[in-house]
Image (cartoon, rainbow, N blue to C red):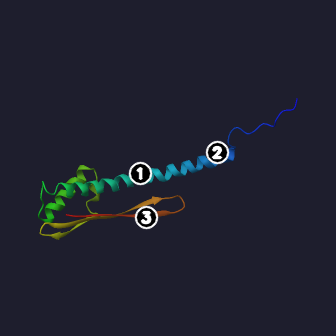
Amino acid sequence: MYSKPMRQLGGSTIVNLILLAALGYGIFVGIQYAPQWVESHAIESILYDIKNTRHSDPVRTESAVRDKVVRMLQINDLGDMTDSFEIRGSDGNFEITFSYDRELNLGFEVRTIHYKHSISL
């Protein structure tokens, strides 16, 4: 009898190692980037909450705005961010700006990512 040649059923070892390395690299970068992403969205949430609660809890001085932002940072366990924001304005019109840098190690280089969030009240 004449039989057909067998076809390969799975990936080769080299392809499997390349896929495993790519997956490992993605996990390596993701483990570093995920906390930065969570921190960035927590700050956006704080700014959004401050703007939405302005009518029910009006703040008229810069020190009151600063106290409210610091309190919200401490509630969200971001107390180390108290030096990363500034408040400008007066007479009930304020602009809160968060500006900070984080490093992301890509293996072949360390890239600095600049985050900036601001809101006008």
**Residue 34: which disc?**
1
Residue type at mark 2: give it: Asn
Label 2 crowding class (10 Å Cα cut-off): few <14, some 14-19, many 20+? few
Q: Which of marks 1 and 3 is nearer the N terminus?
A: 1
**Residue farthest along the top direction in this orientation:** 1
Residue drawn at (38%, 54%), measured in percent from left and top? 37
Query: Could you say where residue 31 lies in the image, as x and y percent from the top left?
Result: 45, 50
Query: Could you say where residue 54 lies in the image, as x and y percent from the top left?
Result: 16, 57
Res 101 → quadrant: bottom left
Q: In this view, does 114 lie to the left or right of 76?
A: right
Residue linked to disc 2: 16
Q: Distance between the residues labelled 3 and 2?
A: 32 Å
Residue linked to disc 3: 112
* Closer to us: 26 or 105: 26
- The secondary structure type at the circle numbered 2 is helix
Which mark is in front, 1 or 3? 1
